[in-house]
Image: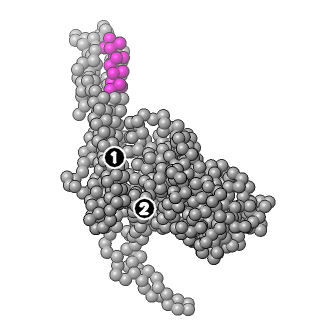
Amino acid sequence: MVSFSQLRNLKPSEFEEAAEGWHKVSGAASEAKDRVEKEIVAKLQRDLKGAVRNAAVERLRRLSRNFHYVQVESGLVRTALNGLASELRAAQRKLEGAVADAEAEKFTVKPDGSVHWVSQQELMPLNPEQSTTAASPRVVLNTDPQRVKAQGYADRIGSAITDANEADAHYSQTLDRLKANNNLNVTDSDWADAQKDMNALRKSAGKYMQRNDIPQGKTPAENAKWWKGLSADERADYTALFPASIGALDGIPSDVRNEANRAVFTETRAAYQTRLDAMPPEPLFKWKTVAGPYAPSMVPSDEWMAWNNKYHAEEVTAALKGMNAIQDRLDSPAEDGLPETYLLGFSPEGNGRAIIANGNPDTADHTAVYVPGTTSRLSRIKDDITRMTDLWKQSHALADGQEISTVTWLGYDAPQKVGRDSPQHHFADDGAPAFNNFIDGLKTSHESSSRDHLTAIGHSYGTTLIGSAARQGTLNADDVVFAGSPGVEVGKATDLDVPRGHVWNEDADGDPVPELGRLVGLGGNQWKYRGGVGIIPSDPLFGANQMSTDTEGHSKYWTPESTSLKNQAAVVVGQYDKVVTDG
């Protein structure tokens, strides 16, 4: 229990000094994690091969994960101490104000917090000395104005002490949670528990900072202004307490978003793995045969359906598949000469969200942002990640030492059913504002010391989303590349908010999607944005630069060393004279 004298003599700065110590621990753990991953592991991956190297890399990654855990948990301790200091300081100021006001009225505040005065009324008992506290019984018929004032000051003092005790109680419970098992291996359950620690701290720190303090629905420029206006401690505490919100904030530095999203990703992946590990075994027989109108068919068994519905097994397994693909990319920073990976967005909810950058777009001279198409979701993100690593390698080979960043942007709900969903415009129209915000955010956070040439690349329905983004608002891209486009909602390139002459298209032999898109109405015409004759980017009338392809089908535009990929890379690095066009 916090007493009057303890609160009056308290030094909240001592808690802040302790928080700064934990901040140093968190920072040191972060630096150690980066050193292990970016220097030691990267060098081993680059220079050595074989079973011994693989064993060493696995041990070092375990060490890196441990450092990451120390970084995250120490950040929570720092935030808790800063929150406790903030609330105790507020309670102390409240107390000091009440004492000062009482003493100004000639009342005496005693060491136990009671308010003392000498009554001036004539009809008082023989002892005119009076005292009261917040807990004193109320006098029903009170004719002494001094008692009324004294009681008011006593109540204010009591309220301040109550605030201090409430802060002490809930922060002490939260800090008690912030401890790890005494071993050398941070497990999935440890990370899942870290997520619970963060949620518990949010409840404790509600008076210190809240999620609603973070901008919502603002422009990237407004987000950046808010971020720059925070102190270093506030930035660290918001990131520790609300990493998902900070990680999703377009316009703030990519390295900040990366750190925040990695914490969310690691905790979420561990929580899903823990759920999967806790499930009872899958029923032996998944399928059963039922009679059909023409022939028997196979459907899930009742036992399997009950098991899956209870434990959401398919949902958990699918999400983990995508998370494991992301983890594989995070674990291979130096393989094939690839740059560091930046996780700029992540959520497992619904179809999932993931934004993965090869290289830092804030410092890159040339950035490409790729939007996948129909059936894209978190569980299927592996191929989309690979496409952008292959594009990075091809672009890097042309870049003459300039820095490249290629980004996989799964930031929208893509159509999931071919034929049912893919002809619909609303998937593109609903996702386009988020894409525009992301692109604007990259422009906002980009450092002025390098070029900021940016290319938007879409595949299949992803081109429709980019077309919608360029039709609905300002698409802050210097070039646009369409591959296998079913239509982009407009009938001519000049209707897109893209510099004239900087719309590029690839249509490979044997790709059925462009013509199907024309038929279902995803294209446009020369007189209105949609419908009509269904002009698509492959049509000469559309006015795009038609790039040559040497790949076949709908999904091979990113085949390594192909003309299809080399042409994209030439656009990405702004070497337009190296683009091979048709005709």
Kindly report which numbered mark, 2 or 1, lies closer to the viewer in this rendering.
Answer: 2
249 or 300: nearer the eye? 249
Colouring used for the render: one colour
Where does the C terminus fall, quadrant-wise?
bottom right
Q: Is 96 covered by the magenta stretch?
A: yes
Q: Is residue 177 visible?
A: yes
* Residue 111: image tag: none
Q: Residue 553, how many percent across, how many down?
A: 60, 75
Residue sitting at 48 percent across and 50 percent down? Answer: 360
Mark found first going from the N terminus, 2 or 1: 1
Q: Residues within 10 Å of mark 1 (few under 14, many from 20)?
A: many
Instruction: Report the residue marked by disc 1.
Output: 30
Q: Is residue 287 above or below residue 502?
A: below
573 or 3: nearer the eye? 573
Residue sitting at 37 percent across and 74 percent down? Answer: 307
- Relative placement, left or right, of 503 versus 559 is right
Q: Is residue 145 above or below residue 401?
A: above
Instruction: Report the residue marked by disc 2.
Output: 336
Q: Main secondary structure of the magenta part?
A: helix
Residue sitting at 44 percent across and 80 percent down? Answer: 300
Q: Which residues are magenta?
A: 91-107
359 or 220: nearer the eye? 359
Question: What's under tag 1, amino acid-wise?
Answer: Ser
